[in-house]
Amino acid sequence: MDSSFPMRKIIHVDMDAFYASVEQHDNPALKGKALAVGGEHRGVVSAASYEARKFGVRSAMPSKTAKEKCPHLIFVPPRFARYKEISKKIREIFYEYTDLVEPLSLDEAYLDVTENKKGMESANQIAKEIRQKIFEQTGLTASAGISVNKFLAKVASDINKPNGQKTIHPDKIEGFLEELPVEKFYGVGKVTANKMFSLGIYKGKDLKKRSIEDLTRLFGKSGAYYYNVVRGIHHSEVKPHRIQKSVAVERTFFEDLFDEQQVDEKLQSLSEELQNRLQKNNILGRSLTLKIKYKDFSLYTRSITKEEYFSSAEQYFNTGKKLWELRPFDKPVRLLGLSLSQLNTEEKKQVSVQLKIPFKEFEDQ
């Protein structure tokens, strides 16, 4: 650990199988069943219940593969408006304790509770209270990780899932990380983990033996990150004002698109949806990207950037159509998407100042 940098009390809260749990909560007939949120015949799994995960079903898995792994799998279509509604309730609970909340998605967030609105010393107790309130108000369970920085809290939240929490006390960080399998390190994906295995790096203690020069040579810029986090060093602060860098809408189709009229209709619908989302939040952007996924799962994207901001559904549609005409392949299309970037949100960027309070007590229960 870097003793020159103030330690914080950070909680990472992660809802348990969020989308699937919402569906099971709202429809009791689905409780205890192997459930996937997504299209049964096309597309991918957005979320899987724990009952489905026992059969190897995972999010981002093609629905066809999921059904092969779990023939009795039940598919339900996603209801994002409902998930956002519940996510809002959960965030309101977070704000009862601190304004330093950094949402990562609808179902997870970091909280800095070093200084908190309740004046509570124990971050462990705060996490317990938050999880209890989430259950009482939504009927859903959450898991939590508690430690001195975001990296450790994120790793810890996965240890006692579902419906549990884990505190990594400052005195136990070194031993914990040395015994942690490298594939459990946040930021180490499957490809990187396999590369580490091939180099004889299986646990944190193996990673710790490598110099920063060695790791940088092997893993590029990520090498310095791995060198630091295995030593418990991660200085990234909880950022309550995350700057939105893009807005995207996309659709996976139950039947492949073959002709121009179908594509025009879908692009028009996507353009209108994009405009509605942008208008609600007073967002403009200068770069429009068209995303095409073909029947064979090959992906194509193309962008146009203008000096002035896009401002209407008609502009999105006309530009999206131009990008469509530049596509290299005439193949059946399974997904279309439009996204806007280089947003005016960057001009409105708010700077948040985070309190750096000396560490007083870190209860480990």
Image: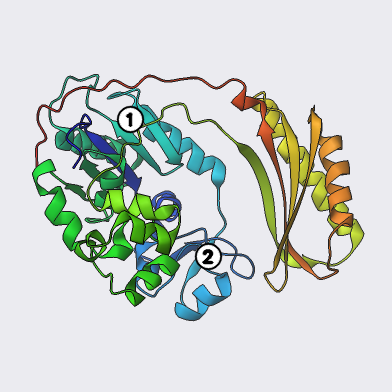
Q: Nearer the viewer, residue 295 or 28?
A: 295
Relative placement, left or right, of 239 versus 344 is left
Q: Nearer the viewer, residue 176 or 6?
A: 6
Q: Which mark is residue 75?
A: 2
**Alpha-carbon neighbours of circle 1 within 10 Å: few (<14), some, or many (≥20)?**
many
The kind of residue tagged 2 is Phe
For residue 93, above or below residue 132:
above
Residue under circle 1? Answer: 94
Q: Which mark is residue 161?
A: none
Indicate the quadrant where residue 162 lies. Answer: bottom left
Indicate the quadrant where residue 215 lies. Answer: bottom left
Q: Nearer the viewer, residue 35 or 214?
A: 214
Relative placement, left or right, of 277 versus 229 is right
**Alpha-carbon neighbours of circle 2 within 10 Å: few (<14), some, or many (≥20)?**
some
The kind of residue tagged 1 is Phe
Q: Which secondary structure lies at badge 2? A: strand
Q: Nearer the viewer, residue 41 or 228?
A: 228
Relative placement, left or right, of 19 versus 198 is right
Residue under the image location 63 percent in, 71 percent down: 41
Give the alpha-carbon distance from disc 2 to disc 1, as whole Å. Answer: 31 Å
Residue under the image location 21 percent in, 41 percent down: 147
Which x, y percent locates residue 281? 63, 26
Which x, y percent locates residue 230? 25, 53
Q: Quadrant of the N terminus?
A: top left
Indicate the quadrant where residue 240 lies. Answer: top left
Residue under the image location 84 percent in, 51 percent down: 323
- Residue 4 in sight from this viewpoint: yes
For residue 123, above or below residue 364:
above
Residue under the image location 88 percent in, 42 percent down: 318
Which x, y percent locates residue 197? 33, 74
Q: Which secondary structure lies at badge 1? A: helix
Which mark is in front, 2 or 1? 1
